[in-house]
Structure formats: structure tokens, C-alpha cells
């Protein structure tokens, strides 16, 4: 969506915007805070930084500070979040949200940008839905005047997804996922050199309690021998299959094996597959010198990648524009990435879709869970499986592959057309006898459908097969 920034200049005069980071930190959050702050100032709004997440909102006081342009200077390259993040139990209570509403009203804030995971964004939506009732209760308690409540009748909410797991449906990438992948790949590349020197097998555990994105993409990027993710538990007897695969790799000259496992990996029966179990299995079954490396919070640390800095900046700008354009009838939205563009999406629809993935996994509908993750996840998973292990050669390759079902027939005249097939993996024309042998086929000729019942006659003329309609 094209935005005329010049028209937006000073369009937010008289408004107040607050930004907070909540839940687990992710590289790129500082870039998002910077973008929201500076875009807010650009449009003429007051911008407040809320420190320590929802806890700062509940506590108020110095946890909510007015920002200026320089407040966010030289933070775009920093990992973590300079305004802090905390998991706040108080905000899950009615009393906590009542205090939060009071502290926002003290400063005239009715526009809130929350950067966090689906839990943080769900909490923000609950807060928004209760806003009118919270104001009425504050008036009844005498903590605010009725006129103040009338001036701030609704709360606008916009979410930014900060999660290294890339586990939120509706967006191609979440803030921090790309940087976490960079950390993982740095570790894998470093381990590969020492593993090769000593002919070792390494089992690397990456984050992803409920989502295997980091494991899938790092396995694809590193050429890992085996992969475990929550969305695709291995079939029963996987232990034998995995050990055979590792042994086959060594027998063909490889000096190392890399196994990547998401921390939430399970088997078909829902039992956790731990990195230590996999390590002991390899040692006992094939006798390889095997080590475990648990990457842990190193995946959250370090500087954000260029991609995450740009992503967060785009999302932060779009978040402010969304807040300016919000009305009392506007539902809460989340800013996602689609086709490298920042897009507004219905917040709770995305949250509910994300929960559907976990529900599918709990009900052992694993293929559906992979599909719900989105095309990108599914494609990465299929590509990894394709490239991880050489498939046995087929004993006999068919001479001709035909596209006969709903195939398109190309013609130069109403009564002639050619049928294209594949022969020895090269485009070729089908022989008449082979085509006639098929009992069911359909030809599309000049927007009309013809089947074998239409008495189609085929004739070979100089390697072009013509179709005559009787």
C-alpha cells in the first residue's frame, strides 16, 4: 500500500501513542521501537515509551516516559529491547488492567503499539475490548472525571509480532526470526569444522517448543543428515532408519553427521524426543563419537540482521499509520509481512489461526499442521526432505509421460491440434497408438471440451499429431 508521508505530516497532532515490548525478546525489537517513536513524532503525536512491558503499564510512574527524537538514537543495531520486557501476571487480572487503563488516561494515551508474541497480542486485544468498562469503573471510583472518560472513549491497538520462532500465522516473517537463523548457522558452521576433524556426530538442539521453523530452515541451509520438528513426528521405527542413514553417509565418505532437533520435537505418540536420547542412540547403535550442543538463548542474542532491521522499521511505520486511521469501529490489527510489504491483518483471526496449528498437532493431524504453517514452511520442509538423502534409482523409467487429464491442446486451426507429452525427460509428441490406448482423457480445444466419446481421430503428420473432430 502506497503511503503519502507528506500528507501524514502533523496529522497526529493532539494524539498520544505508547509503545511497549512484551514476552520473549527478539532481535529487531529496538528497530521497531525506533520506527514507532520517530514516525509518531513525524506525524506530530506525543510518543511514550513503556518500560518493562505490561508490568510497566500496570505500575505506571517512571515506567512510562515521554520520548523525543534522540531517545531512540543508536539503538537500531542493538539486540534485545532497550525498554525491557517482562512476563506480567498482574496484567492478566482485572485489577491489573484497571491500573493500566488509569496510567494511560493520566497521559491521554489512547493508541497502543504492542510488540510481542501471540500471548502478548491477545492480552492487548482483551484490554481494548474492556476499555469502556474499565473507564466506567474508574469514574465510579472517582479516580478520573466523567469528562476525561468522554474524551478517551476507545483504545486503538496495533500489534507487531516479535518472535524468533516465526510461529505466527498470517505473516511471512516475524521480527527476530532471521537474526536467530543467522546465530544458528554461525554455530553450525563452526561445529561442522571440528566435527569433520574428529569424525564426530553432533546433535544440535534449537529453539522451537511448538514450531519447527528454525529447525527446518537451519537443517535445509546446513545440509543436516536428520531433522526432528514438532509438526512432523517420525514414523515408528525411526531409530533404525536414522542410524542407517547416518551409517550410509559415513560409508560414502562423509566424516561427520549433523542432526538438528527442535526443542519441542515429539514422536507419533506425543512423547518428547530429547537431544540426549538421540545422542545415546547413535553411540549405542553405531558407535560414533557423538556430542550434544544446545544453542539456548544464544539464538536470541547478538545484533539483528539487516533484514530484521528493515522489517521492523517497515512494520513500525505502518503501525503508526494504522493507529492514525483507526476508528471506534476498526478492529485491532497486527502488522504482517506479505510479498515483502507491510500489511495490516485482523489480529484475532491471525491469533486463532496460530492456535489452530497447535490444535491440529494435539489431535495428531500433522499434515494439516504443516499446511496451516503456510506455503513457505511447507515448501522448506519438502525441499529439505528432497535434498537430504539420495533416493534409490527407479528400476524402470517410463518412456513417455502423458499429460492427458485436463491437458491443453494447442492448435493452429479449428480441426487440428498437437498433444504434448514428456519422453525421456524431454518435451515430445505422443505417438497415436499410445494416446489411443488411454480410456479416459479430456482435450480442451478452442474452449470446448472433447473426450474419447466424441470420436476424436488422431493422425501423425511430420512429428505433429493432429486432432480431427468427427
Image: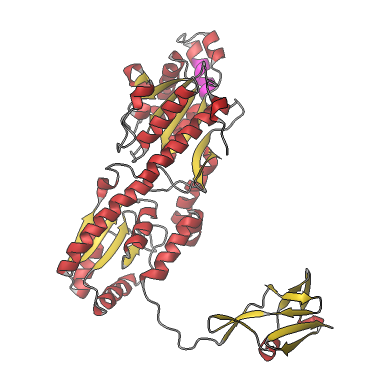
| Residue 135 makes an appearance in the image | yes
| Residue 86 makes an appearance in the image | no
On whether residue 132 falls in the magenta region, the answer is yes
Question: If the image is split into quadrants, where does the N terminus sit?
Answer: top right
- Name the residue: 45% across, 88% down: 395
The part of the chain drawn in magenta is: 131-137
- Left or right, residue 360 beside residue 191: right
The quarter of the displayed image where residue 106 is located = top left
Where 127 falls versus 306 (above or below)? above
Total numbered labels = 0
Residue 329 spot, x, y in % from top left: 62, 28
Residue 346 spot, x, y in % from top left: 55, 39
Residue 435 spot, x, y in % from top left: 68, 86
Where 2 falls versus 262 (above or below)? above
- Name the residue: 23% across, 63% down: 192
Residue 12 spot, x, y in % from top left: 52, 21
In the rendered image, the residue lying farthest to the left is 198
Q: Nearer the viewer, residue 381 or 370?
A: 381
- Left or right, residue 162 beside residue 352: left
- Left or right, residue 220 beside residue 427: left
Q: Nearer the viewer, residue 69 or 461?
A: 461
Q: Main secondary structure of the magenta part?
A: helix
Amino acid at each position: 500500500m502506497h503511503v503519502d508521508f507528506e500528507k501524514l505530516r502533523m496529522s497526529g497532532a493532539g494524539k498520544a501513542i505508547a509503545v511497549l515490548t512484551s514476552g520473549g525478546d527478539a532481535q529487531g525489537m529496538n528497530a521497531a521501537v525506533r520506527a514507532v517513536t520517530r514516525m509518531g513524532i513525524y506525524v506530530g503525536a506525543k510518543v511514550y515509551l513503556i518500560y518493562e512491558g505490561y508490568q510497566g503499564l500496570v505500575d505506571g510512574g517512571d515506567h512510562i516516559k515521554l520520548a523525543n527524537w534522540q531517545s531512540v538514537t543508536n539503538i537500531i543495531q542493538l539486540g534485545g529491547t532497550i525498554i525491557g520486557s517482562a512476563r506480567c501476571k498482574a496484567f492478566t487480572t482485572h485489577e491489573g488492567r484497571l491500573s493500566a487503563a488509569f496510567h494511560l488516561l493520566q497521559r491521554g494515551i489512547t493508541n497502543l503499539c504492542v510488540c510481542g508474541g501471540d500471548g502478548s497480542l491477545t492480552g492487548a486485544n482483551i484490554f481494548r475490548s474492556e476499555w469502556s468498562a474499565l473507564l466506567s469503573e474508574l469514574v465510579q471510583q472517582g479516580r478520573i472525571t466523567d469528562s476525561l472518560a468522554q474524551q478517551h472513549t476507545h483504545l486503538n491497538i496495533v500489534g507487531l509480532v516479535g518472535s524468533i520462532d516465526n510461529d505466527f500465522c498470517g505473516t511471512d516473517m516475524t521480527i527476530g526470526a532471521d537474526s536467530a537463523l543467522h546465530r544458528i548457522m554461525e554455530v553450525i558452521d563452526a561445529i561442522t569444522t571440528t566435527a569433520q576433524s574428529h569424525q564426530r556426530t553432533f546433535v544440535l538442539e534449537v529453539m522451537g517448543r511448538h514450531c519447527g521453523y528454525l529447525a527446518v530452515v537451519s537443517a535445509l541451509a546446513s545440509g543436516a543428515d536428520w531433522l526432528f520438528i514438532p509438526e512432523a513426528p517420525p514414523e515408528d521405527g525411526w531409530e533404525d532408519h536414522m542410524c542407517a542413514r547416518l551409517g550410509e553417509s559415513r560409508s560414502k565418505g562423509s566424516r561427520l553427521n549433523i542432526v538438528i532437533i527442535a526443542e519441542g520435537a515429539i514422536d507419533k505418540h506425543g512423547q518428547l524426543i530429547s537431544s540426549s536420547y538421540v545422542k545415546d542412540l547413535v553411540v549405542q547403535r553405531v558407535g560414533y563419537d557423538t556430542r550434544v550442543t544446545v544453542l539456548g538463548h544464544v539464538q536470541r542474542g547478538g545484533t539483528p540482521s539487516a533484514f530484521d532491521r528493515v522489517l521492523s522499521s517497515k512494520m513500525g511505520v505502518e503501525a503508526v499509520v494504522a493507529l492514525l486511521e483507526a476508528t471506534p469501529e476498526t478492529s485491532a490489527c497486527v502488522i504482517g509481512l506479505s510479498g515483502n510489504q507491510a500489511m495490516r491483518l485482523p489480529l484475532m483471526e491471525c491469533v486463532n489461526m496460530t492456535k489452530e496449528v497447535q490444535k491440529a498437532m494435539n489431535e495428531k493431524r500433522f499434515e494439516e499442521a504443516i499446511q496451516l504453517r503456510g506455503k513457505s514452511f511447507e515448501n522448506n520442509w519438502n525441499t529439505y526432505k528432497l535434498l537430504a538423502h539420495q533416493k534409490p534409482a527407479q528400476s524402470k523409467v517410463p518412456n513417455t509421460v502423458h499429460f492427458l487429464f485436463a491437458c491443453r491442446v494447442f492448435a493452429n486451426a479449428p480441426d487440428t491440434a498437437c498433444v504434448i507429452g514428456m519422453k525421456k525427460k524431454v518435451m515430445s509428441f505422443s505417438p497415436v497408438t499410445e494416446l489411443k490406448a488411454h480410456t479416459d482423457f479430456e482435450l480442451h480445444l478452442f474452449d470446448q471440451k472433447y473426450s474419447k466419446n466424441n470420436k476424436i481421430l488422431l493422425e501423425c503428420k511430420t512429428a505433429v499429431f493432429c486432432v480431427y473432430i468427427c
